Image (cartoon, rainbow, N blue to C red):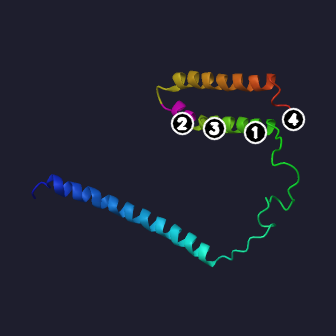
Amino acid sequence: MPEPTGVALATEYFRSYSVVGLLALIGVLFVAVAFTAGRLLRPVVPTPEKLLTYECGVDPVGEGWAHTQVRYYVYAFLYVIFAVDSIFLFPWATVFAADGYGATTLVEMFIFLGFLAVGLLYAWKKGVLTWT
């Protein structure tokens, strides 16, 4: 069987991507048709009530600017940090069980947990962990 030429290889290469391109085009067309149909079928009756800002059924009163407590974001941020860090413990446990990696991975994990403990101690000293 003869060796395929450069043109034949390029044609086969781009043919495999043409399926992906066709699928992307169909997806874009589907979204465009859905938005166009929605625009054509919906009623357009602007009233002052429809133009008001709406949230939870409460009529807007006062300014649009409101103060938000930062501590809730800090709690969420700390949760994300410790959740992501706990994800790293599972691969470490599998590598720790492998031959020849035990002592090295154990030291690395204690260093990693030390960084986490320092961060938690810093947050505790700053008073971030007190819920008031």
Looking at the rendering, the stretch of residues picked out in magenta corresponds to 92-98
Q: Residue at 81% across / 31% down in the picture?
A: 129
Q: Are marks 3 and 4 in contact (CB under 8 Å)?
A: no
On the image, numbered disc 1 is attached to which residue? Answer: 73
Magenta highlight on residue 110: no
> How many C-alpha atoms fall within 10 Å of the one at disc 3: few (<14), some, or many (≥20)?
few
Mark pair 3, 1: CA separation: 16 Å
Mark pair 4, 2: CA separation: 37 Å
The type of residue carrying mark 3 is Val
Quadrant holding the N terminus: bottom left
- Front residue of 102 and 65: 65
Q: Residue at 88% across / 50% down in the picture?
A: 62
On the image, numbered disc 3 is attached to which residue? Answer: 84
- Front residue of 49 and 7: 49
Q: On residue 102, which mark appears?
A: none
Q: Position of residue 125 (x, y in %)?
A: 80, 22
The label nearer to you, 1 versus 2, is: 1
Q: Quadrant of residue 44?
A: bottom right
Left or right: 20, with 48 as reference point: left
The type of residue carrying mark 2 is Thr
Q: On residue 131, which mark appears?
A: 4
The type of residue carrying mark 4 is Trp
Q: Position of residue 86 (x, y in %)?
A: 64, 36
Mark pair 3, 4: CA separation: 23 Å
The label nearer to you, 3 versus 4, is: 4
Secondary structure of the residue carrying numbered label 3? helix
The numbered mark, 1 or 2, whose residue comes first in the sequence reads 1
Q: Residue at 57% across / 34% down in the picture?
A: 93
